[in-house]
Image (spheres, rainbow, N blue to C red):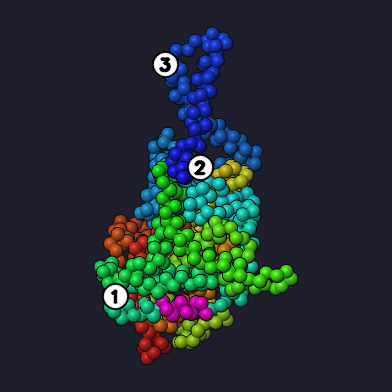
């Protein structure tokens, strides 16, 4: 039986906690035995009790001294640190704020006061580790590309995410990451990512169900709808096995939940989706707590049960893929086609069931959640900007027509649609925050006039936030907080993005850039074309939005971007809308003014 996280963590701390007291006690005994030095029992007790705290304080300040010395030797300086509200509490209030922000805050909002005070890079000194936070594109470029070898996911992030992601591509470094990358890269060719039959079948199914539910007089949860679309599309494309989550139907609004059928309630895909959400939120919580996260799950891993659900869901898919592999004629010298799915390709490279399970979960995070996020916030922006929706529909009708299926060439030529998707990705990037850990000391440039570069010690976790970076007015112009797809088409493109491409990173960059980037663009664009061909008058349905998922009144009283929000964006590994995105829309009538 596996040892629970808490006791296991404490066991690893035994040398750390008991080593110094044991040395002090042994030193007194040795001095008494060999030198006749007698120390009172009360002094011995105090010295033993204080040994670990005193040594920790010494280690903390000695490490900082050595870091400053190393920084000076590199002609650099230490990143400024956020001051603790209660000095001497080793960042406990900061850690509490990180957890509170995850549960109830607006993405990136807690960083804004620190950005105003310390600039776009600062350091959090927490009880278990120090973290550098940066929103500078030059730093992110170094982390992801130019100093790639100096930054890994790191062993501590690996431990935090292992219960969910295992050793998959998003939670591995070195040879294991290269192994996953080499297996998956050849699959994302133009021919495969342009195979639109999969998109068409699932998009038409999803929009038909939406039309039927709207005809009944009920709003729909658009986030749920597109999550089912992307789950079915991803599993068919990646695994050659459509899990048919759309066959469960779509949910009624909370007040009419009693109308949900038994088929919907008991469909295995619903259990999968719920487990996926819970496990990602718990994984995100671990990253906020830091290296001491096992103490918050003392008697049991809070992700394990949900990961078991995910594995039960994927087990039949794996078993079938391995069965087909065993049946194949693998004679030497024959040309083999590994099939149309990524999974059929993977099982010819490894039959390790655990590796395959881990990779499936990782690919579903990428294939389902990221595109589902993009489509969810795309509808939100269509509802908030009807003039953008009208312009998009005009381009769709000009390039594709009112009913035709979009082709690869159509999507390539639809410049405003691509600009619209990019603007959604800019303001609501699917992965708003990410991190790496230094494998060796690194130096990052400073933008401050006359300032030295920043020195980052080894084993330091560096968090980079594209969410905040994408909204910086000094990088994107004074209207950076406004939703305007034209910024990707007019002179602003050449003024801001072209000379500094690292200000826009919805898909990461460098050797770990998202392999499915073009697949995601095609999938999201295809669905949006179908949506615009069939519906109009996009609007939110606040009357059925769960009360706890509506922005609090305090948001509107601020001068920050959250003041304009009508939903609550949440984050775990990716972004989502808390409580779902409940919406209404009308069928597009051929004779209506929207057809013009």
According to the picture, the residue beneath numbered tag 1 turns out to be: 218
Quick check: can you spot residue 300? Answer: yes
Percent x, y of residue 362: 52, 60
Percent x, y of residue 132: 52, 47
| Of callouts 1 and 3, the N-terminal one | 3
Residue 495, by quadrant, is bottom right
Q: Does dot 3 land on a helix, a strand or a loop?
A: helix
Front-lying residue, 387 or 290: 290
Percent x, y of residue 403: 46, 87
Residue at position x 49%, y 49% from top? Answer: 160
Q: Does dot 1 land on a helix, a strand or a loop?
A: loop
Front-lying residue, 418 or 291: 291
Residue at position x 49%, y 24% from top? Answer: 21
Residue 576 lies in the magenta stretch: no
Name the residue furthest bottom: 591
According to the picture, the residue beneath numbered tag 3 turns out to be: 42
Q: Quadrant of the C terminus?
A: bottom left
Q: Tell me which secondary structure the magenta stretch mostly adopts.
A: helix
| Of callouts 3 and 2, the N-terminal one | 3
According to the picture, the residue beneath numbered tag 2 turns out to be: 130
Residue at position x 70%, y 73% from top? Answer: 335
Residue at position x 53%, y 23% from top? Answer: 23
Q: State if disc 2 and disc 3 touch (CB < 8 Å).
A: no
Residue 271, by quadrant, is bottom left
Residue 198 lies in the magenta stretch: yes
- C-alpha gap between disc 3 and disc 2: 36 Å
- The 10 Å Cα crowd at callout 3, few under 14, some 14 to 19, many 20 or more, is few
- The 10 Å Cα crowd at callout 2, few under 14, some 14 to 19, many 20 or more, is some
Q: Disc count in the image?
A: 3
Task: Give the magenta part as a residue range.
Answer: 197-206
- The 10 Å Cα crowd at callout 1, few under 14, some 14 to 19, many 20 or more, is some
């Amino acid at each position: 039986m596996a040892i629970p996280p808490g006791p296991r963590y404490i066991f690893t701390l035994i040398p750390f906690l008991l080593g110094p007291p044991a040395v002090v006690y042994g030193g007194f005994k040795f001095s008494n035995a060999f030198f006749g030095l007698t120390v009172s029992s009360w002094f011995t007790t105090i010295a033993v009790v204080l040994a670990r705290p005193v040594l920790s304080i010494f280690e903390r300040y000695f490490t900082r001294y050595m870091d400053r010395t190393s920084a000076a030797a590199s002609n650099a300086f230490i990143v400024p640190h956020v001051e603790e509200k209660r000095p001497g509490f080793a960042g406990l209030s900061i850690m509490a704020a990180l957890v509170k922000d995850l549960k109830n805050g607006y993405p990136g909002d807690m960083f804004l006061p620190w950005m105003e005070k310390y600039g776009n890079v600062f350091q959090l000194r927490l009880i278990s580790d120090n973290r550098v936070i940066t929103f500078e594109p030059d730093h992110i470029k170094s982390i992801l590309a130019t100093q790639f070898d100096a930054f890994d996911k790191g062993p501590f992030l690996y431990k935090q995410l292992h219960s969910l992601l295992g050793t998959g591509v998003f939670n591995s470094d070195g040879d294991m990451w290269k192994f996953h990358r080499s297996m998956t890269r050849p699959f994302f060719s133009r021919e495969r990512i342009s195979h639109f039959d999969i998109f068409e079948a699932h998009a038409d199914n999803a929009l038909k169900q939406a039309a039927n539910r709207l005809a009944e007089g009920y709003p729909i949860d658009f986030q749920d709808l597109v999550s089912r679309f992307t789950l079915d599309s991803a599993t068919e494309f990646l695994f050659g096995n459509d899990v048919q989550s759309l066959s469960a139907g779509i949910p009624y609004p909370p007040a009419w939940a009693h109308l949900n059928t038994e088929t919907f309630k008991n469909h295995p895909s619903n259990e999968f989706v719920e487990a996926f959400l819970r496990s990602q939120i718990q994984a995100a919580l671990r990253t906020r707590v830091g290296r001491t996260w096992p103490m918050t799950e003392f008697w049991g891993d809070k992700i394990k049960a949900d990961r078991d659900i995910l594995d039960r869901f994927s087990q039949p898919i794996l078993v079938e893929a391995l069965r087909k592999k065993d049946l194949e004629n693998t004679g030497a010298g024959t040309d083999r086609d590994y099939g149309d799915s990524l999974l059929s390709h993977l099982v010819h490279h490894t039959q390790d069931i655990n590796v395959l399970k881990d990779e499936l979960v990782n690919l579903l995070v990428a294939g389902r959640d990221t595109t589902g996020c993009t489509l969810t916030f795309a509808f939100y922006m269509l509802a908030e900007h009807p003039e953008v929706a009208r312009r998009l529909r005009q381009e769709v009708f000009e390039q594709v027509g009112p009913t035709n299926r979009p082709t690869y060439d159509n999507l390539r030529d639809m410049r405003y649609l691509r600009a619209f998707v990019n603007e959604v990705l800019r303001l609501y990037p699917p992965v708003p925050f990410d991190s790496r850990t230094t494998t060796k000391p690194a130096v990052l440039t400073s933008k401050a006039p006359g300032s030295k570069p920043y020195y980052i010690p080894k084993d330091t976790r560096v968090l980079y936030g594209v969410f905040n970076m994408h909204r910086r007015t000094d990088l994107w112009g004074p209207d950076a907080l406004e939703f305007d797809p034209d910024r990707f088409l007019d002179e602003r493109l050449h003024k801001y993005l072209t000379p500094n491409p690292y200000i826009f990173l919805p898909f990461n960059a460098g050797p770990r850039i998202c392999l499915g980037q073009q697949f995601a663009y095609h999938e999201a664009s295809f669905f949006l074309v179908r949506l615009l061909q069939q519906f109009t008058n996009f609007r939110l349905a606040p009357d059925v939005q769960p009360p706890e998922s509506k922005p609090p009144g305090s948001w509107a009283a601020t001068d920050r971007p959250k003041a304009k929000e009508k939903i609550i964006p949440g984050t775990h590994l990716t972004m989502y809308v808390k409580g779902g995105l409940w919406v209404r829309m009308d069928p597009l009538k051929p004779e209506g003014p929207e057809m013009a």
